[in-house]
Image: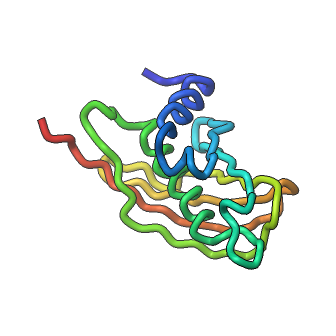
Amino acid sequence: MKLSKDEIIKKANANCKDTLMETLQIEFVDAGDDYVIAKMPVTNKVHQPDGILHGGATVALAETVGSFASHIFLDTDAFFVRGIDISAKHVKSVRDGFVYAKASFVHIGRTMQIFNIDVTDDHDNLVSTCKLTTVSLPKEC
């Protein structure tokens, strides 16, 4: 059964309650056939000591959006997803506003999924580009 865009966003945001995603105020805002987008506010909660967005917070946002993209295509009653590799290239600093992570599929396999995730600022400038690999594993009965 294919979920609607609104159902995907609602499900994603519901899964953020009482998690790191809620702490970082990550909110899913858009989804399509081959992508998912989430946003995160850039405040002092996610700053490095010198007042710019911490790369670790950026990577947490990227892994969040990529991992949830895997969930959309899985039977989550039978399988769970784990990130197994993530890399990031940070190209621009951000002090305030929001950053947006868009996870786009590179490969959707039965057990392995690969995503490109671009993180942009409020003006659509590239902040970071990430690659995430996830694995789908069967849940034990």
- Which one is nearer the viewer's eye here, 110 or 126? 126
Q: Position of residue 96 (x, y in %)?
A: 82, 60
Horizontal and vertical percent for residue 82? 35, 54
Which residue appears at 57% of the width and 49% of the height? 23
Find residue 22 and report its image quarter.
Answer: top right
Residue found 65% across the figure and 70% down from its top? 54
Say left or right for 86 vs 46: left
Where's the C terminus, which quadrant?
top left
Outermost residue toward the bottom in this view? 50
Percent across and percent down for residue 127 are 74, 67
Picture quadrant where residue 7 is located: top right
Q: Is residue 84 left or right of residue 29?
A: left
Identify whether 27 is placed above or below 75.
Answer: below
- At a point 64% along the width and 41% down the height, the residue shown is 27
The answer to whether 53 is drawn above or below residue 34 in the figure is below
User: Seen from this angle, which residue lies furthest left?
Assistant: 141
**Where's residue 132, x and y in %?**
48, 62
Q: Residue at x 42, y 40 (%)?
A: 71
User: How was this image coloured?
Assistant: rainbow
In this picture, residue 53 sits left or right of residue 15: right
Q: Is residue 49 above or below residue 63?
A: below
Tell which of 35 and 37 is nearer to you: 37
